[in-house]
Image: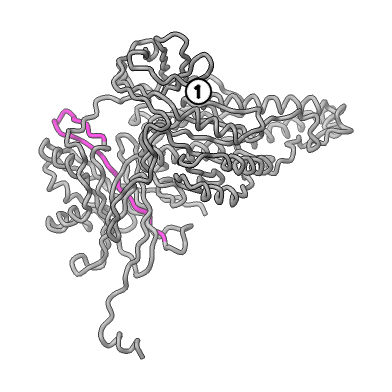
Amino acid sequence: MKRNVWLRFARVRQHLTIYSLLLLPAANVTSQSPSQDSKTPTEASRAAGEAKQPSPNSSSLLRVTTRMVVVDVVAVDKKGQKVNDLEASDFSLREDGREQPISTFNFQHPGASASLPRALDPLPPNMFRNLPKYQPGGALNVILIDALNSTLPHQAYVRAEMVRFLEKLPQGQPIAIYALGRKLRLLEDFTTDLSELKKVINAFRGQSSHLLANASGSPDTPVLKGWAEQLLQVYDPQLLQQIGDFTQENLADQTGMRVQLTLSALNALARTLAGYPGRKNLIWISESIPMMIVPDAKKMPSRESRDFTDQLSMTANLLTDAQIAVYPIDARGLVGSAFYDAANNLSGQAAMGGLASRAEGAQAEELLQAHSSMEDLAAKTGGKAFFNRNDVGAAVRNDMEDGATYYSLGYYPLNKDWNGQFRKVQISSKRPGVKLRYRLGYFAVDRVEFLKHHPQQQDMDLNLALNPDSPEATSLQFQATVVMPSAENGNHIRLNYAVDPQQISFTRESDGLEHAQVDCAARIFNSSDLDKSLKTLGARMQAGLEEDAYNRINRSFFPCQLTLDLDAGTYFLRLAVRDNATGHIGTVNAHIRVPGPPQSADKAANSNH
């Protein structure tokens, strides 16, 4: 069921103290006004105390003056063996040809430390948080099985290959498995339990893509062929041209929708994995990737093309900011000639209209485009593409091994002009014989300018994050407490958010105040029906803080509060926060039970009879 729910946020501004910031009103966009949500000082202080957000480890001030760029580097020798003893002084790093000072440097390799489930204290009832559930000791591996861009036969082939892959996988390597179809689904969160991973793969049956012309694997043949095509070419070439144009336009529309759904899935994965430190290897098993992340995409127009350059650049930045390297694998394996494919049924028509040669040409063009997109995406994110091989399981294993040992180099670009252009990164080793692989650059995107050109994107991002089917996002971490109705708050339910201030972008403006803008939102569902939301709430905290208030926020938490009314029953809540300066989003799922009103003594006595 399609939902078109957009949030409108109440704008409130505060320039005083941390105490007065806690009095900022929240707005229920469905029925309430900001004035109806105002709290007394006592209520606001209690709401903040109930959140119980742990203080950050560091009490240093958080000032954002520039953006650090982190580049993961895989180093091998002439024989392809990993080089494990390089120092920061062995690297030279340039951006668009200009030398950059390396600010951070570390080396990661298997066995450096164990990857373990994160030890988290149990939460009291009705308190929820979105902290990452795994503490990685090295690179994490995520497998994405793509049903949106793959036919059913190749999905079945991938499933069989994955079963064989898991049979040979050593214990102790955490893996998460996602599937992309009409939506992105988490099949299994990070786990080292091979039995659970095998159950997930064995249960996966794939699904027919609604945006592929030949989702079942049948040949994508023209509408007219053989004698019919030749006759029409002679007697009504204009009609034949119209049929061809219609086919191309329909294909372009389908491809455009696939690009949008694919980008949305990649954005969701980036926000989900951003809270995990270190490198994440995204092993993307797909028949075709319907896009190319290239710096000069606008210079490559065609009759059927759509301009997704801005969206592609934002997605590329989300992936690289989250330290995600993409390893595409062609789900088709080694592809044979279209002429010998019985499914194409070329016999008896090979001479009519050149069907055989056109089938060969179409297949070659399709493979070239698919493999070029895979190589481009891998190069732009620091991964590696695998195609034309019949061992998908071995390719997955190679991907995991390739991304397990790497160097991380961080620097603050000397060029402060965030003009949206692609900046090339060049890294070389001063040691002879060392070959390096790393992402080729990044887009210097200014989010404020991006939103000016795409004002609807902000609502789309949060709307997608509030979808209960989307994986929980960790790029902005927070804790939320649901305060049930009581004698003090009447029939109101309060949602108290406590956002980690270390992850919020504060900027000092000309008024001398530290400014930040944070949204908090909630989408409520009946527990028995997650296809239709009951209501959506949102509030915007627009703060301008003096030094004392800023210091106190930085040592505790950034607050936000929503108020809603719910009848007695069980509910599913999707809670979200967003830093509007960076676009970072955090989400968490909450299951709550709202008790009914207390029964009187007479009603209780009657109910016992």
Q: Badge 1 is on which residue?
A: 379
Magenta-span inclusion, residue 54: no
**Nearer to me, 100 or 466:** 100
Q: Position of residue 500 (x, y in %)?
A: 25, 42
The three-letter code of the residue at mark 1 reads Ala
The segment highlighted magenta reads 505-525
Asked whether, in this view, residue 206 is left or right of residue 536, the answer is right
Identify which residue is drawn at 50% across, 45% down: 184
Which quarter of the rendering shows the C terminus?
bottom left
Picture layout, residue 135 above or below residue 377: below
- In the image, residue 380 above or below residue 25: above
Q: State the image coordinates of residue 255 (x, y, percent, origin top left).
A: 59, 35
| Residue that appears at 62% across and 49% down | 205
Q: How is the image coloured?
A: one colour
Q: Quadrant of residue 486?
A: bottom left
Q: 487 and 49: which one is in front? A: 49
Q: Is residue 510 magenta?
A: yes
Residue 557 visible in image: yes
Magenta: predominant secondary structure element? strand
Left or right of residue 470: residue 501: left
